[in-house]
Amino acid sequence: MTTPATRSVEGKVFVVTGRGIGREIALLAAREGASVVVNDLGASPEGEGADVGPAQEVVNEIRAAGGQAVVNGDSVADAAGAARIVQCALDSFGRIDVVVNNAGILRDRIFHRMSHVDWEAVIQVHLMGSFYVAKAAAPHFKEQNGGSYVHFTSTSGLIGNFGQSNYAAAKMGIVGMSKIIAMDMQRYQVRSNCIAPAAWSRLIGTIPTDSEETKARVERLKSMGADRIAPLAVYLGGDASRHVSGQVFGVRKNEIYLFSQPRPIRSVHRGEGWTPQSIAEHGMPALQGSFYPLDRTSDVITWDPV
């Protein structure tokens, strides 16, 4: 049992968006001494409908255990709604210390079947939603000279997966945004990091199991609870992580790993400059040995969860 003297985020105010992993983060943050705004529009995995019931259940559980939490049902995909989420923290608890951008939807389609609607809906929730909530909190973090952003990315973008061009684009956009937030707001003691989770959730439950390979993948994912993601997210919200910013972490069951970030790995030079012909004859053959293959996440992270 965590005692008040050792609780990692005692007195902090968290805003946690989305359910699934968000639920576990909210519960752990409360156990570790934080007050929590539990935000969940309550939409379907594809972003349709609304129901604050699941968020209210989390709030009830936190309060029953003696913690402090309030529910918020605004949509992160709306700038005004995101502002209300942050205002809810200020109105309820007087401040905001941590933003956990976890809300998301999936609309998986192979690229030539991806509609404009599917593309825009996923970008709006993941990328625009993360920006809207982060932006709403930024003036308060600046004013109080401190704060922490914990954004959720995905190996779908960092590595690759079939049928998720919209999701991957949004998640890679979040990585770029997080890095620049970390740089821009470093002077105000604000930090920003990303987590790429591997855990069973309602979104993962929408993956089609139309082959033995995908069936096996889903079964592996079922062994990885969303509760395994929460400790890193809560740690990143606490003062013990004040030296950690601009990083991309992965969590898979009992593993935590640090992702590389793009840097030049090889170069070619031609004193007189390049032509299309010399690139074909010299430049590209010299670089080709360092090309990345079209790997999927399962091709790169090949070991079983431990």
Image (cartoon, rainbow, N blue to C red):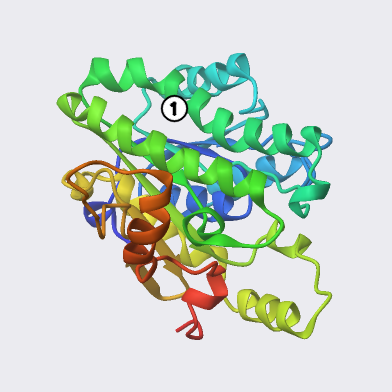
Examine the rendered structure and indicate whether residue 161 appears above or below residue 144. Answer: below
Residue 239, image x, y percentages: 21, 44
Examine the rendered structure and indicate whether residue 33 appears above or below residue 208. Answer: above
Residue 43, image x, y percentages: 77, 39
**Residue at left offset 64%, top offset 43%:** 104
Left or right of 80? Residue 277 is left
Residue 261, image x, y percentages: 31, 53
Examine the rendered structure and indicate whether residue 55 appears above or below residue 290. Answer: above
**Residue at left offset 58%, top offset 49%:** 168
**Residue situated in front as seen by the camera: 119 or 129:** 119
**Residue at left offset 78%, top offset 52%:** 109
Residue linked to disc 1: 134
Q: Is residue 1 visible?
A: no
Q: Quadrant of the N terminus?
A: bottom left
Q: Amino acid at mark 1?
A: Ala
Q: Quadrant of the C terminus?
A: bottom left
**Residue at left offset 80%, top offset 67%:** 208
Residue 199: which quarter of the image? Answer: bottom right
Left or right of 208? Residue 132 is left
**Residue situated in front as seen by the camera: 105 or 23:** 105
**Residue situated in front as seen by the camera: 34 or 132:** 132
